[in-house]
Amino acid sequence: MAFPVRAVDGGGRSARELNTPERTLAMRIDVIDEYPRLCDLKDTWQNLYDADPEAHFFLSWTWMSKWLEEVVPPWIVLAARPERSDEGYVAFFPLRVLTRFRQDVGLVNVLQAACHGLGEYTGLICHPDFEDQAIPAFAKQLRKIRWATLDLRSFSSSDKRFNLILAGFAKQSFRFEYPDFSATGDKIDYGIAPYIDLPDSWDDYLTTKLRSETRRKARRFLRQVEDSDEFRITHANADTLDRDLDFLLRLWALMWGSRYSKNLETVQRTDRMMLEHAFDEGALFLSVFWKNDQPLGALAALIDRKNKSLVVKLHVRDDTFRNPSPGFVLFADAIRYAIGEGFKTCDFMRGNHPYKYSFGVDEASLHDCLVHRRPARDTATYLDKRWLNDALALAHGARDTFQFEDAERGYRQVLKVDPRNRDAREALAQERDRKRDQTAAVQKSKNKTGRPR
């Protein structure tokens, strides 16, 4: 999904200005995996973000730099630049690296488009003059890395860009899996991202976007709040931010926490950190609906000034209170705020939840695809040497929980990738000693009783 934006100078020259045929321009791909090195590229990142009409808020330096700084490593950013020129970087592709255990092949690396998992869109940044060269070069670089799955879910881009990525993975070596959201328990299609094209005025929005019944409801509810001594809507400032976030995240946990089970604290901590950072950067709109001193609902949205969009991130409401509806009041207030700020869109983010359609939304589509490397005899194909520490940690974890076969399998995989890995060699030797001692104990029991105990 891309919203119309003002084209600005990205600080780089086009392929034409380099007097190089656009489709033959060779690209060099650097792999950045250290945060200080990434920070050196802040200006370049921001210039490319401004120049890219498809770049969304979750690819902005404001959001992505904080996410990469705080997320548990490893992560990588693929950075593309023309090979035979003094041109700087013209594209960035941020990815998270995960190590998993799969029953069929053992330890594997998964590359995941950065920010997936907390509801955000994923994607890449590219100067539009270089997408025909940079994006295929990203795919070529990805083929050189050892992994089992490339996770490209919630990917927000044009069809052209997404197809340029997938075209780099030949079907004889890779297979594509497209998630079926219709099979989810809540029957919500998370490949759809509803949004509102905002008119120039609130009255125009009410008249052109809403049905008559919803229009009357919006006017009645907002008037009920504005004329009341007991109802009010507050917008967070430096003095109220902690209080408002406390309520937002506490009620969110009550409403949705069961979906996250063991990860709930991590999700809440990450959300709070990212929302606080957005506030510090002037990119957070956080409203709370009150009845006297009792909060009834809250809405947190991100302010995307480049795309002139308000992006709804989290919202909660007290479902026991009906008149006026806290959720409806908060959305109406947020849309009115966005129009007043001159924004062109209000983005409701992933999922075709029915309530969104009462606000006059249109639909954008996200790309969702998992690229799987086809089975190989050598299981080391799925494990990259640079991330063996994570693989070893999983193997040690299997050993510590008495999953000895999985642990031994993992140590052998690590040694296939790095035959000199001392930790894996010693752990495998200890596993052999354990098995030998166990065999000896069983044999000793047989000699005494004639059968194992």
Image (cartoon, grey):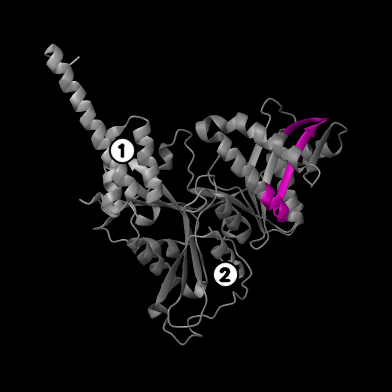
**Residue 163: image location, x then y, percent:** 39, 62
Q: Is residue 445 above or below residue 251?
A: above
**Left or right, residue 273 beside residue 1:** right
**Left or right, residue 300 beside residue 437:** right
**Residue 99: image location, x then y, percent:** 39, 46
Q: Is residue 97 above or below residue 163?
A: above
Q: For residue 181, which quarter of the picture?
A: top left
**Residue 413: image location, x then y, percent:** 28, 47
> In this figure, which residue is indicated by the disc labeled 2?
48
Foreground residue among 141 and 14: 141
SS at mark 1 in the image: helix
What residue is at 29 percent from the left and 33 percent from the top? 404
What residue is at 41 percent from the left and 83 percent from the top? 21
Where does the C terminus fall, quadrant-wise?
top left
Foreground residue among 371 and 220: 371
> Looking at the image, can residue 13 be seen?
yes
- The amino acid on which the numbered mark 2 sits, given as a three-letter code, is Leu
- The amino acid on which the numbered mark 1 sits, given as a three-letter code, is Ala
Q: Residues within 10 Å of mark 2 (few under 14, many from 20)?
A: many
Range of magenta residues: 276-296
> In this figure, which residue is indicated by the disc labeled 1?
407
